[in-house]
Amino acid sequence: MKGTVGELGEFGLIRELTSRLTTTSAVRLGPGDDAAVVAAPDRRVVASTDVLLEGRHFRRDWSTAYDVGRKAAAQNLADIAAMGAVPTALLLGLVVPADLPVTWPAEMMDGIRDECQVAGAAVVGGDVVRGDAITIAITALGDLRNHEPVTRSGARPGDVVAVTGWLGWSAAGHAVLSRGFRSPRAFVEAHRRPEPPYHAGPAAAGLGATAMTDVSDGLVADLGHIADASQVRIDLRSGDIDIPTQMSDIGQAVGVDPIQWVLSGGEDHAIVATFPSDVKLPARWKVIGEVLNPSALPQVTVDGAPWVHAGWDHFGDDQGAE
């Protein structure tokens, strides 16, 4: 592919992007009409949407277009899994400058397509618009498969808190990139391309999870949403949370206690849930805390004490790109 998006034109770009897509059995009518048709056997559709803005959520000097596509899809599909649903479809809204090389959105679409395949979903449509900065808006859909949705409001005193997936890896990778390095590669790649445990959400619903969310803004911050919605206190045991040796080494090198990344770093999209204490959890789940009666306001504590480091806030004054 040669040239720019402006030279290719709107409909040429749409043809290029849709030519790269695959489909699934849930897609009854894909891109090319006024709207797509996706099967909903459960007769309920779980839906979530998110927006990524260049310079705010990704940097082209840190991540390839393919990386950005994988990340954009992953963070939306993880929201579907965190409701206990199976991802089925994804819609893309794309804003790009006219002088952007065509290869960039094409490679981004490859990333979105490949991440959808990991989750068992497919891109079914979208829109492209000319603008000054690259903006990616994604809507993900999912099927509950006859389960009730697992919301944030069901945690009860006596439940255990368990997590599956990585914690703090993306934040550690961000710290590495911020200092101009590209290794350890595993942490940098975790930041560029998160790997949500999609299977874990529906599996947790089947196990009887009482509340659930994915870790997008930081473990404490996201559990805070559960604590608030459920009107409970959640206490985490820091000694039960694994910190890899390489993460500790990175922390020592940059002067950061890695527990801050684990508890406050977002964008790993691990799944954290509360379960009745008598549920036998598979080995992939790690119990890291418990649900208690609120002593005052609903909150999350760590080893019995408040955690003072905030997680991600899109309107915070100190939030940089990625």
Image: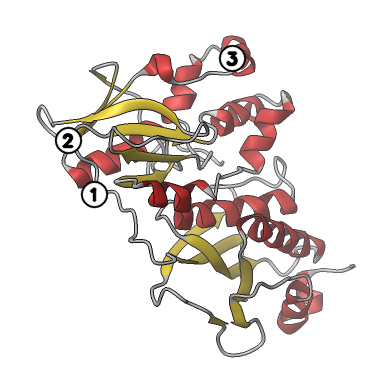
Q: Is residue 101 left or right of residue 219?
A: right
Instruction: Give the mark nearer the N terminus: 2 vs 1.
Output: 1
**Quadrant hosting residue 134:** bottom right
Residue at (73% x, 71% y) in the render: 22
Residue position marked by numbered label 3 in the rendering: 254
Which label belongs to residue 208? Answer: none
Q: Is residue 103 left or right of residue 251?
A: right
Residue position marked by numbered label 1 in the rendering: 153
- Locate residue 46, reporting x and y percent: 41, 66
The local secondary structure at tag 3 comes to: helix
Residue position marked by numbered label 2 in the rendering: 298
Instruction: Give the mark nearer the N terminus: 3 vs 1.
Output: 1
Please, what is the three-letter code of the amino acid marked with disc 2? Pro
Q: Nearer the viewer, residue 179 or 82?
A: 82
Residue neighbourhood size for the residue with mark 2, other residues' Cα within 10 Å, grouped as few (<14), some (14–19), many (≥20): many
| Disc 2 from disc 1: Cα separation | 12 Å
Please, what is the three-letter code of the amino acid marked with disc 3? Val
Residue at (52% x, 28% y) in the render: 168
The N terminus: image quadrant: bottom right
- Locate residue 294, reporting x and y percent: 13, 31
Foreground: disc 2 or disc 1: 1
Q: How does the figure colour the protein chain or chains?
A: secondary structure
Q: Nearer the viewer, residue 232 or 133?
A: 232
Residue neighbourhood size for the residue with mark 3, other residues' Cα within 10 Å, grouped as few (<14), some (14–19), many (≥20): few
Residue at (71% x, 58% y) in the render: 114
224 in relation to 145, above or below: above
